Image: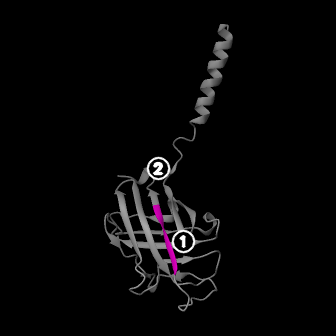
């Protein structure tokens, strides 16, 4: 092999390496985001991707974690809205079911299934205990939790309390964007 061939090969290899590493800093860990991987009544798993705009994490001005997924991020057309007050690890936390939004009390934790028109609120009875259990909270970068949620069945456009509740189990993982970390 002559010097010119070695030089050309080295230049091509360096260029290839630079191109392959171009996206290395474009990931959830840097840009923020994550996913919810879940089952519905035991079927699944399904995944909904979370962007940085889908989640509000606790900070000096808010004491809650709130997320609202986008339907287009779910192959099934599912959408979840979920709020947890004062998230902490190692405890089963009740999701916030209703909140005052712009002066109106409304459901804040709900699920819409398979492009249906109905947003099923949390089931409010003692036999269906919904909870979120955070097992990892790294204040400036990561939230990880198990989900066990029961929603009213509202797939027909109206909620029907006579139908069994929709049971959603799964895993939430969210990374805070690099520029918002302490």
Where residue 36 sits in the image (x, y, percent)? 51, 63
Where residue 29 sits in the image (x, y, percent)? 47, 49
Q: For the N terminus, which image quadrant?
A: top right
Q: Is residue 150 above or below residue 49?
A: below
* 2 vs 1, front mark: 1
Q: Earlier in the sequence, mark 2 or mark 1?
A: 2
Residue plotted at (44% across, 85% down): 103
Q: Would you say residue 114 sits in the magenta stretch?
A: no
From which residue to which does the magenta span run?
Answer: 166-172
Residue at the top extreme, as displayed: 2
Report which quarter residue 125 is drawn in: bottom left
Q: How is the image coloured?
A: one colour
What is the spatial separation of the Cα atoms under label 2 and label 1, in whole angstroms? 30 Å
Q: Residues within 10 Å of mark 2 (few under 14, many from 20)?
A: some
The chief SS type of the magenta part is strand
Residue plotted at (53% across, 40% down): 24
Element carrying mark 2: helix
**Residue marked by disc 1:** 42
Q: Are marks 2 and 1 in contact (CB under 8 Å)?
A: no
Where residue 102 sits in the image (x, y, percent)? 46, 81
Residue at the front extreme, as displayed: 42
Q: Is residue 103 above or below residue 41?
A: below
Element carrying mark 1: loop
**Residue marked by disc 2:** 29
Q: Is residue 91 above or below residue 152?
A: above
**Closer to the camera in the image, 117 or 64:** 117
**Closer to the camera in the image, 85 or 63:** 85
């Amino acid at each position: 092999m002559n010097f010119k061939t070695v030089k050309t090969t080295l230049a091509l290899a360096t260029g290839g390496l630079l191109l392959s590493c171009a996206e290395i800093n474009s990931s959830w860990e840097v840009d923020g985001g994550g996913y919810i991987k879940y089952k519905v009544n035991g079927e699944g798993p399904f995944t909904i991707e979370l962007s940085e705009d889908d989640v509000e994490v606790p900070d000096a001005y808010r004491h809650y974690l709130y997320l609202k997924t986008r339907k287009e991020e779910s192959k099934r057309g599912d959408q979840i809205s979920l709020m947890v007050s004062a998230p902490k690890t190692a405890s089963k936390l009740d999701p916030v079911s209703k909140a005052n939004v712009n002066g109106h009390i409304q459901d804040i934790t709900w699920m819409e299934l398979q492009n249906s028109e109905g947003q099923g609120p949390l089931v409010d009875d003692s036999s269906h205990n919904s909870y979120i259990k955070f097992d990892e909270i790294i204040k400036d970068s990561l939230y990880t939790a198990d989900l066990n949620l029961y929603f009213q069945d509202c797939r027909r456009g109206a909620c029907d309390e006579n139908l069994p509740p929709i049971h959603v189990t799964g895993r939430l993982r969210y990374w805070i964007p690099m520029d918002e970390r302490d």
